[in-house]
Image: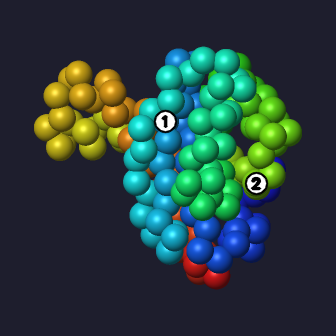
Amino acid sequence: MIDIETLAEALPRGARLLGLDLGTKTIGLAVSDAGLTLASPRTVIKRKKFMADLEILKALIAAENIGAIVLGLPLNMDGSEGPRAQATRAFARNMMQHVALPIVFWDERLSTVAAERSLLEQDVSRAKRAERIDSAAASFILQGVLDRLYSAGTRGT
């Protein structure tokens, strides 16, 4: 696990970032472009067991030339970590045993709210919003990291 400040130097040139919004029933996915400018949602993983979820993630990592993973950390509104944050950290520890990529945590507070608002603005139906919300939240999480890399002047280096 690394922090955002060392992400750019840990990322191979041309590699993409994978954003994950980890839920109890689903994992929302988003992938950056190779220039680290834009986050795009991918299909949602319906969670099963860790190893089954991991196999899907490993296939995506290989197919999309992923160089690092951004994992949304669900902090409480006061910034403290509750059970969901602890479960996310445990998922990351388990994943690190099977995937040799850096993992960065990113505060995901209000990402689902922002994703819901965006889908509403796009006039997406309630049923379609339910299908897309987790990947839209993963996109917001990942886009936050991409914007931070840009503002730090380290994107694409």
Disc marking residue 70: none
Q: Earlier in the sequence, mark 1 or mark 2?
A: 1
x then y, percent, for residue 87 = 72, 24
Residue 37: percent from left, percent from top: 45, 69
Q: Which residue is mark 1?
A: 28
- Residue 68 visible here: yes
The amino acid marked with disc number 1 is Gly
Q: Is residue 109 left or right of residue 87?
A: left
- Find numbered disc 1 in the image and state the secondary structure of the residue it sits on: strand
Residue 125 image point, x, y percent: 17, 28
- SS for dot 2: loop
Q: Quadrant of residue 47?
A: top right
The residue singled out by tag 2 in the image is: 101
Above or below, comparing residue 131 to residue 73 in the picture = above
* 55 shown above or below 60: above
Mark 2: which amino acid?
A: Leu
Tell me the quadrant of the picture where the C terminus can be found. bottom right
How many numbered callouts?
2
